[in-house]
Amino acid sequence: MPDTVGIMNELAAFLRRPDIAAEMEDDLRTLVAVPSVGAPGEGGYPFGPACAAVLDAALALGEKYGFATENHAYYCGSILYGDAEKELGIVTHLDVVPASKEGWTGDPFTLLRDGDLLIGRGTEDDKGPFIASLYTLRFLKETRRALPFAVRLILGCDEESGCTDLAHYLSVRSAPFFAFTPDSEYPVCIGEKGMYGFDLVVPCDAGTEITGGSAPNAVPASARAVLRACADPGVLLYDEQITLESAAGETAVHAEGLTAHAAMPESGVNAIGALCRYLAANRLDGSAGVRFLAESCSEYLGKAFGIDCSDDAFGYLTCVGSTVHTREGMLVQNYNVRYPMSADIGEIRRRVAEKAASLGGRVENESVSAGYYKDPDSAEIRALTEACGTVLGGPCAPYTMGGGTYARHMPGTVAFGAAIPALRGLRGEGRGGAHQVDEYITVTELECGVKIFTLSLLGIAEAQS
């Protein structure tokens, strides 16, 4: 490793400067203010005007601090430090999942500071980590650190919806020799589960309309059924997750759950499962489709499909029923499956198709994204691991996860930070995390990110000298 003590002292002085502290928070505030939820392309903006606006704002920050920038046709952008032909990448994203004001302490798109916490949609996922990456480049530039490679900070705009931004990037630029994406937790993630998404299309009773969920990679927090008949609440079973409204010959049934990222469904409560259990238990819809959604959306191990499995490196498969709608008398339920690399995706797909057929339905809109596994003993992984240990202390052994990051879409990339596990969960259960209400990043995490990323880059540079 380089002179770690000296560099840490320089980093501490840099981060203590009043201008740096103020600008770091203000820059994050600027980005959070843009509700950059992906939308259909229009006017030359492939992911809609909001994602284009946040990319413009982030590239303007790079230019403000003296860096060269590139806009890759609004699919993504780059901020560059150094001009060597060989490039190391830091891959971030600026798009976010939807957020309504319900349940938030404040406006989700107005940065709120509460002590060490900076609260707002995208603060953890992934605008805050972008800021930590940008200030890493600021430190390197201001201290005139020369590296044997250029650093390319990539700013994606489609991570939450499909990662087509990186496909475009790789069509116009070469992949870095190594990259990390700060879209997870420390230490370094050397493997991600494979991902399988699909729509299960199954029949429901005539007159039933069901909607629920807001994103395919999140446990749904709410779901709603409209029945073309008035139900008598006095004869229905009580359920604390359910509220009823009857009017004009219809009954609306609302279910409330608790959202969570589909990669970590353990902390969530699936509202679609709660809704369909209620409909089935009260015979408001007796269809096989509703009964199956009641079963499959009330657990997250894939047992309802017969696809549950696990291995030592990745743990167990997860299967989350995420969004649902009704189309021409059929329920269209999306599922998000994260499977260990030892699993046979062909066999998983076969069992899902068999289950759909047994319900009188079918499978549509399948997508598969292979996972990855990296050598924990490579020079780059060792540099990241040592940097993490220096800043955070204690053991920082590499790990695997179910989350899907840019790492699976960019060759030679791993997930690394920027969340510190000990600083997660400070807003209480079901709050404060990625895709949750009161999403936050701490100032401590931003500052540690600058330190860890700087030491990582310098460690990789030394390994190449």
Image (spheres, rainbow, N blue to C red):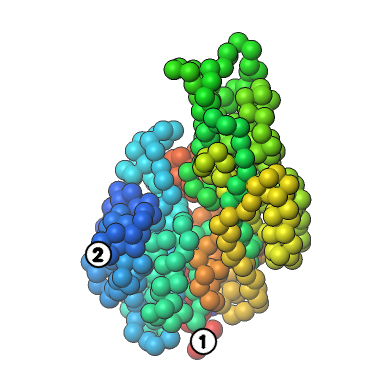
| Residue 443 image point, x, y percent | 41, 51
Q: Residue furthest left?
A: 64
| Residue that appears at 70% across and 54% down | 352
* Nearest the eye: 92 or 221: 221
Query: Residue 323, position in %: x, y?
Result: 53, 44
Measured as percent of width and height from the top left, residue 23 is found at 28, 56
Is residue 83 placed above or below 439 in the rendered structure?
below
| Foreground residue among 70 and 451 | 70
Q: Amino acid at mark 2?
A: Ala
Percent from the top left, x then y, of residue 232? 58, 13
Q: Residue at x 55, y 38 (%)?
A: 329
- The answer to which image quadrant residue 315 occupies is bottom right
Where the N terminus falls, by quadrant? bottom right
Cα separation between marks 2 and 1:
32 Å
Observer-side mark, 2 or 1, equals: 2
User: So how many labels did they put on this image?
Assistant: 2
Is the residue 357 above or below the residue 230 in the image? Answer: below
Residue with the most extreme top position: 234
Quadrant housing residue 27: bottom left
Residue type at mark 1 is Gln
Disc 1 is placed on an element classified as helix
435 displayed left or right of 263:
left
Which residue is depicted at the point 50% across and 73% down?
410
Q: Which mark is residue 60?
A: 2
Residue at image position (61%, 68%) is 370
Of the two numbered discs 2 and 1 on the same chain, state the one appearing first in sequence: 2
Q: Bin the neighbour count of mark 2 within 10 Å (Cα to Cα): few under 14, some 14-19, many 20 and up.
A: some
User: Badge 1 is on which residue?
Assistant: 464
- Name the residue nearer the viewer: 72 or 378: 72
* Residue 66 visible here: yes
